[in-house]
Amino acid sequence: MKYVVTGGAGFIGSNLVDELIANGNEVHVIDNFSLGSQENCNNKAKYHNYDISDSKNIQKFIEIFKSVDTIFHCAAVARVQPSIKDPIFYEKNNTMATLNILQSAVEVGVKKIVYSSSSSVYGDTTILPAKEDAPINPLSPYGAQKYYGEILCKTFSSIYDVETVSLRYFNVYGEKQSIDGAYALVIGIFIYQKLNNHPLTIRGDGNQKRDFTYVGDVVRANILAAHSKHKFKGLAMNIGNGDNKSINDIASAIGGETTFVKNVIEPKETLADIQLAKEILGWEPKTNVIEWIKKSLKT
């Protein structure tokens, strides 16, 4: 099988590339390495250094997409807080990039696109666990852009008869995650602070809860979606662990001194209802975040 992974030098994308390669597939990666890392590259994949937010590259994408079975659109500029500070940069790199990939795909008749969405579309919902039909109420430009990407996917399925499915990831962690910089997530930040003998910085009181989802489980969901016989027409599905832990729980598992700082705009709690993914994909998570942290700290 021939696949394309956008953002394949990033956290989730590179883990997906590794699994696809391990399964004997031909894999093409589109990544301009603005956020992805050369260290994440798999030497058995073919890399194309293009900016997917630039419509001038569409003809190049069309050439890459010829005879491709599925496109995994993982590329994005992630994180809620940076998107609040620079929404225009995020709009270009998230919304326009998704439109360019969709347009290029339909030009050559790509059968299926698996779109990486986010639980950020729900915002601070009080309806938990969140089902896919819960109210959409993003708290950031990033969350709004991810939802608009879903709408684009659904619209393209309706107009151009390309299969699209949107996977709403909940708080992904695991191997190759960023551990420092503006785009690092809380587990990566805590591990970085622990390794550098810094106190773990907790925003607010630390009682906010997150549905932490292992990247290997996310990768399996992507591959199952690609192989599924279900006729996807823009369906959105939650990909989460189905339970949650507080930030204090994570800090306790990592261990060490903690310090508390002012909180930022963020949901108080995230928790996924994953029944739809179980029913349609036959998928369920296998990895517990606390167990993974303890194992990682031993290696």
Image: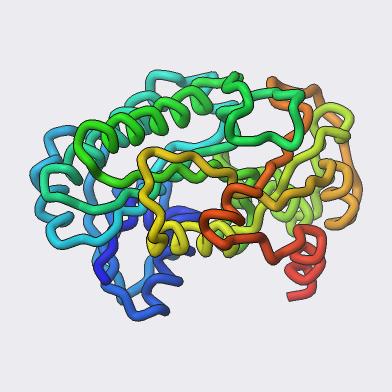
Point out the image quarter for the C terminus: bottom right
Question: Where residue 297 appears, x then y in whole percent?
Answer: 78, 67
The answer to whether 106 appears left or right of 297 in the picture is left
The answer to whether 254 appears left or right of 105 in the picture is right
Count of numbered circles on the image: 0
Question: Where residue 191 appears, x then y in whole percent?
Answer: 73, 55
Question: Which residue corresponds to the image point at 39% horizontal and 64% vertical from the top-left?
Answer: 227
Point out the image quarter for the N terminus: bottom left
- From this viewpoint, is residue 98 visible? yes
Using the image as rendered, state which of residue 71 and residue 247 is in the foreground.
Answer: 71
Res. 99 image quadrant: top left
Using the image as rendered, state which of residue 133 and residue 153 is in the foreground.
Answer: 133
Question: Which residue corresponds to the image point at 25% horizontal and 41% vertical from the top-left?
Answer: 101
Using the image as rendered, state which of residue 32 and residue 174 is in the foreground.
Answer: 174
Question: Where residue 90 appears, x then y in whole percent?
Answer: 41, 27
Question: Which residue corresponds to the image point at 44% horizontal and 57% vertical from the top-left?
Answer: 225
Question: Where residue 278 appears, x then y in whole percent?
Answer: 61, 56
Residue 103 lies, with reference to residue 199, above or below; the image says above
- From this viewpoint, is residue 138 visible? no
Residue 180 lies, with reference to residue 208, above or below; the image says below
Res. 155 image quadrant: top left
**Image coloring type:** rainbow
Residue 130 lies, with reference to residue 289, above or below; the image says above
Residue 219 lies, with reference to residue 45, above or below; the image says above
Res. 29 image quadrant: bottom left
